[in-house]
Image (tube, coloured by chain):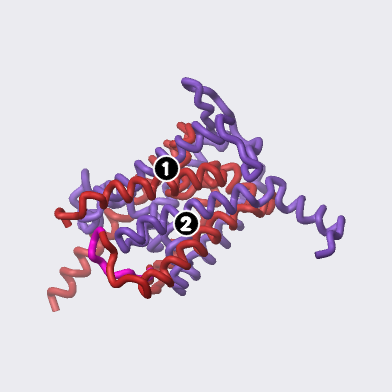
Amino acid sequence: MVADPVLLQAVAELFPNGISRYAVGGLLVGLGTVLIYVGTGIPAGASTFLESTLSYVSGQSRFQRYVGSRDWRLVFTAGIVLGGLAFAATFQSGVVTSSLYEPGTTGQLYEVAGVTLWTTDVQPWRLFLGGILVGIGTRVGKGCTSGHGVCGVGSASKTSLVGVATFLTVAIGTAQVVAALGVSP
Amino acid sequence: MADRHPLFKPLVFVGGIIFGFGLGFSHMARPEVVVNFLLFEDLGLPFVMFGAAIVSGVAFALLPRVRDAAPLTGDPYERRLKPFDRNVLVGGAVFGVGWGLSGICPGAAYASLGVGNVTILWALGGMFVGAYAQGYWRSRSGTRDAAAAGAD
């Protein structure tokens, strides 16, 4: 390989935080998915939890179809939350360090009981309004970033590849428009 | 369903922990990082989703050749294949607007809560509102369709 300094500079600008934290994170997301799949045969997605959990409080037929899976989906989501906390207590708190982990500069850090926690600067109205659309879109569209993006793409499902291409393209367009309108953060 | 293997939920829990740790480590649990990717300011994010897809893809391809059924459920190993229809495009587009506006998707939102992002409760609340709205509407139109079909 020839190390062209101009090329290296261009690559560094495209990846200001490197790629290792993303690749390692993706590897772990994949391992979590595979562990569940090996044991249960279930390619688990994250967004069904929204509807399956609503089945505890609503008798609508759309939610009741998930009664059989709602308990383990709650367990899966509790695991995801705890996994985030485990990351916060280790790498985010600086207790564990690695050359593969790039801390970054986004948002606000704060401490509770010796654990460094993080919170976003993105405005609540964006999170709430965006969240409503994510809730509608992932359920109508048969999957989210994990269901379509990880399990569906991993299955070479044409439906999921089209789904991912759709939400990725629209998300890029939306974020560009929102930024052009001067909304930040 | 009720007589699942005693290790079923513990395994799902451990899988969820690894999954959530990965979302934290990758910073995909931070809406700013997702928005920065969508604005082409940091192109690292696809390594998360596609990296995970490659890992799961290897397992999805290999396991059916190694074993007939999953040990904890007895279910056969199958790929995740869903039928294509207009909903995939409509729902995908609505999800895309929401993801582009907020920078957060469901799995990343759960992990975000874990890394301490209390503000993400706005997004989680919104997701439940949206999921309820579409479920309410589709339950009703589903009942209507069934009634119409039954009337024939």
Question: Residue B30: percent from the left, percent from the top?
Answer: 55, 41
Query: Which secondary structure lies at badge 2?
Result: helix
Quadrant including the C terminus of chain B: bottom left
Give whichever of A81, A58 is nearer the camera.
Answer: A81
Q: Tell me if residue A130 is in the magenta stretch.
A: no
**Discs 2/1, front:** 2
Q: Is residue B121 left or right of residue A20?
A: left
Q: Magenta part of the protein: which range? A: B72-79
Question: Residue A97: percent from the left, percent from the top?
Answer: 60, 36
> Which label belongs to residue B55?
none
Chain letter behind tag 1: B
Question: Residue B19: percent from the left, percent from the top?
Answer: 44, 49
Is A48 above or below relative to A158? above
Is A109 above or below relative to B132? above
Give neighbour class at mark 1: few <14, some 14-19, many 20+ (Cα, 10 Å).
many
Real-space CA distance between mark 2 and mark 1, rounded to the nearest whole angstrom: 17 Å
> Which label belongs to residue A30?
2
- The residue at 72%/47% (across/down) is A16
Outermost residue toward the right? A5
Amino acid type shown at disc 2: Gly
Instruction: Give chain B's shade.
Output: red
Give neighbour class at mark 2: few <14, some 14-19, many 20+ (Cα, 10 Å).
many
- The residue at 50%/58% (across/down) is B52
| Residue A80 quadrant | top left
Task: Determine which residue is flagged by label 1.
Answer: B110
The purple chain is A
